[in-house]
Amino acid sequence: MVLSANQKTEFWRDGCLVVENAVTKDQLAAMRSLMAEWTEESRSHSKPYGPPTIDGRPRFDMGTEHSPEKPALRRINNPSDIYSPFRDVMENSAMTDMVADLIGPDVKFHHCKINQKLPGAATEVHYHQDFLFTPHTNDDIVTALLMLDDVDETNGCLKVVPGSHKGPLYSLFEGDVFTGRMAAEVTSSMKERDVPVTGKAGSVCLMHTRLAHGSDPSLSVNPRGLYICVYTAADAVPIAQNPMPNENEGRIVRGVKKRKARLSPAIVELPEQPKSASFFTVQGQASARGD
């Protein structure tokens, strides 16, 4: 066990938990080095690019405000597929052990991504619950958001609504259109109760899949990168296509594989899967389009 009894109680009460030192100094340094390289590399591109994901989408995505002078690299899709430092952390870190403490002992990997906010970038995350993007037969699912930089209230930190994981699931549709975001009136209610999630680089926010959350654009000169890994109990089976398919989907990272699925009663709207480089476009934030 990595987490204390009090920490586990806090997670199940609030729907999230921040823990320091979720990776080693060497693991953190290796990931930060790649992030710096990718940010510099993005200056020479004017639209989404890079080694494609297994469904053919660009791996690197930038916002429309991106330029060589002010890069706006905002998403790297499934870095654990091809970059060993991220694969190592996904499988072999204290972060993974923490997830097993919460939903284990048998845990499998679903997908990962990096969300980054660079100085001057307009990226925000509109309020939503992850479960409606990745519905499963049960909701023993944890999103681990590893802080690659120091995160504070000025650089676009995650904001969560404690306890909302125990409440209803809110539609991500507007009429027949999948917007990937809660309705405006629901968002207003959520913002009245949200709290910021901050921490030092190397800390992780463990978040329940049903927890309502979002974030604002950064107002800081300091970057904010999050390496986001989604894990499920081994007996949680997807009932919709993975929005970010990858070669490691379903990999058992702790414990053993399960032959049976555990079913929890729920009525869930099935999402529409994005075809663009990132879900930011689903939420209405276009990608850079090139010259």
Image (cartoon, rainbow, N blue to C red):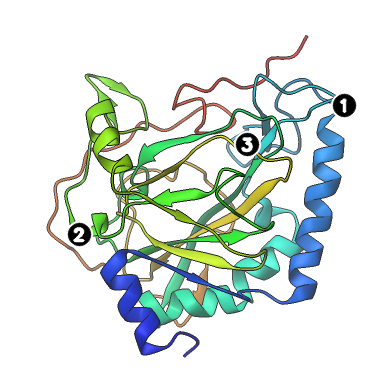
Which corner quadrant holds the C terminus?
Answer: top right
* Circle 1 residues within 10 Å: few <14, some 14–19, many ≥20: few
What's the residue at 35%, 32% (across, down)? 181
Task: Please state which amino acid type lies under the numbered disc 2.
Answer: Lys
**Residue 140 in the image: x percent, y percent?**
31, 66
Residue beneath disc 2? 166
Residue beneath disc 3? 219
**Residue 44 circle label:** 1
**Residue 124 circle label:** none
| Secondary structure of the residue carrying numbered label 2 | helix
Res. 201 image quadrant? bottom right
Q: Is residue 209 above or below residue 260?
A: above
Q: CA distance from mark 1 to mark 2?
A: 45 Å
| Secondary structure of the residue carrying numbered label 3 | loop
Mark 1 vs 2, N-terminal side: 1
Task: Please state which amino acid type lies under the numbered disc 3.
Answer: Leu
Is residue 35 something one can see in this rendering?
Answer: yes
Q: How many marks?
A: 3
What's the residue at 39%, 80% (across, down)? 7
Q: Nearer the viewer, mark 1 or mark 2?
A: 2
Using the image as rendered, state which of residue 218 and residue 291 is in the foreground: 218
Task: Please state which amino acid type lies under the numbered disc 1.
Answer: Ser
Is residue 260 something one can see in this rendering?
Answer: no
Q: Is residue 116 above or below residue 88?
A: above
Q: Nearer the viewer, mark 3 or mark 1?
A: 3
Q: CA distance from mark 2 to mark 3?
A: 32 Å
**Residue 203 in the image: x percent, y percent?**
60, 68
* Dots 1, 2 in contact, CB < 8 A: no
For this view, does 24 lie left or right of residue 125? Answer: right
